Every structure is written in structure tokens, then in C-alpha cells.
Image (cartoon, rainbow, N blue to C red):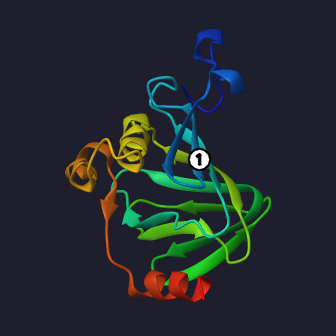
Amino acid sequence: MSGTEFPRPDDVVLVREADAEITADAPGSLITLIADSDRTGGAVTTNRTILDEGVAGAPPHFHTRATEMFFVLDGALQVLVDDRVVVLEKNDFLAVPPGTHHAFAPAPGSFADALLVFTPGMDRFDYYRLLDRVNKGQAGVEEIKASSERFDNHYVDSPLWRETRAAATR
């Protein structure tokens, strides 16, 4: 579809709150699965993430194919972006291009409620379901490591993020 065409009615994606699946990758960390790439023709994958104050959030990682976008609905989100850390507040937006190391957690003293969008989309809901199973003790961390190529989620180390999060919990 070019930029001047309107979507056909069968291209429209509507997800009602009651129909969205909710997973948890840790206590105090809820992920609402809104639309995966199979529903959007590969255009986007989107979820809503609510992180209670003090939750660890997502560790440093990068994607090779997708831009990950964050829109803060409420609270404040602390985000690692390569070699710096920024705090996004309500109604702030951040786009992280492929290859950029990033991580996120609620900012110190705050919770975070954010909409996350990946473009292009890829089937990621099974990744969130895997995190939920690990959280419940039904799967192991080794399964997350083994899924990095499938879900384009590649974990990295970040001394800056470790130091930043350690300071947040003091």
C-alpha cells in the first residue's frame, strides 16, 4: 500500500480490551498482547507494558530487524539507549532503531505504563508467552537464550545499565 492509499476494510485491526491476552514476565510486570504481525500484515507488533515501581524491566538487548518504539501512557520509564540513559515521562515517545542496545525499567520512584510498537512486525507474542512460562517456573532461561534468532531479541551486557539500576534500588 502506498502512502496515498486508504486501507481496505479487511485491513483494519481492532482489538478490544476484553480480547487482549495478558502475560507476566515477573511479579509486578504485566504485558498486554495487543496485535502481533499476523494480525497486521507484518506491519507492526504492539503490546502494553505496565511495570510496578522497583521492577527490573527488560535487560539490555537489541533487535537486528525491528525498530522498537515506546510511548509512555503514565508514570516514567528509564531507558538505556546505547551509551546513555534517558527518562521518558507521560506522553514522551522514543524510537530505537535496529542494532541499538537498549533496556528499560520504571524510573526510580515511579511505575511505568507504556505502549511498545515494533516495526516491521514479527511474531513476538510467543516470546512474551515464553517469558510468562519462565516466570511461572514452567520453562527455563535457556529457552529464552535459544529463542534469540527466532524472536530477534539479542541480549547484551551493559555496565552502564547495571550501575544505573543498582543506583535506582539504593
Q: Nearer the viewer, residue 158 or 106?
A: 106
**24 relative to 15 in the view: left or right:** left
Q: Nearer the viewer, residue 40 or 18?
A: 18
Residue 87: percent from left, percent from top: 68, 75
Res. 20 image quadrant = top right
Residue 75: percent from left, percent from top: 77, 63
For residue 94, above or below residue 161: above
Residue type at mark 1 is Leu
Number of numbered discs visible in the structure rendering: 1
Residue depicted at x 45% and y 38%: 121
Kind of element beneath mark 1: strand
Residue 146: percent from left, percent from top: 20, 50
Residue 139: percent from left, percent from top: 28, 44
Residue depicted at x 50% and y 34%: 43
Q: Which residue is mark 1?
A: 30
Residue 16 in view of the camera: no
* Structural crowding at the residue carrying mark 1, measured as other residues with C-alpha within 10 Å and reported as few (<14), some (14–19) or many (≥20): some
**161 relative to 107 in the view: left or right:** left
Q: Nearer the viewer, residue 136 or 50?
A: 136
Res. 7 image quadrant = top right
Residue extending farthest to the front is: 137
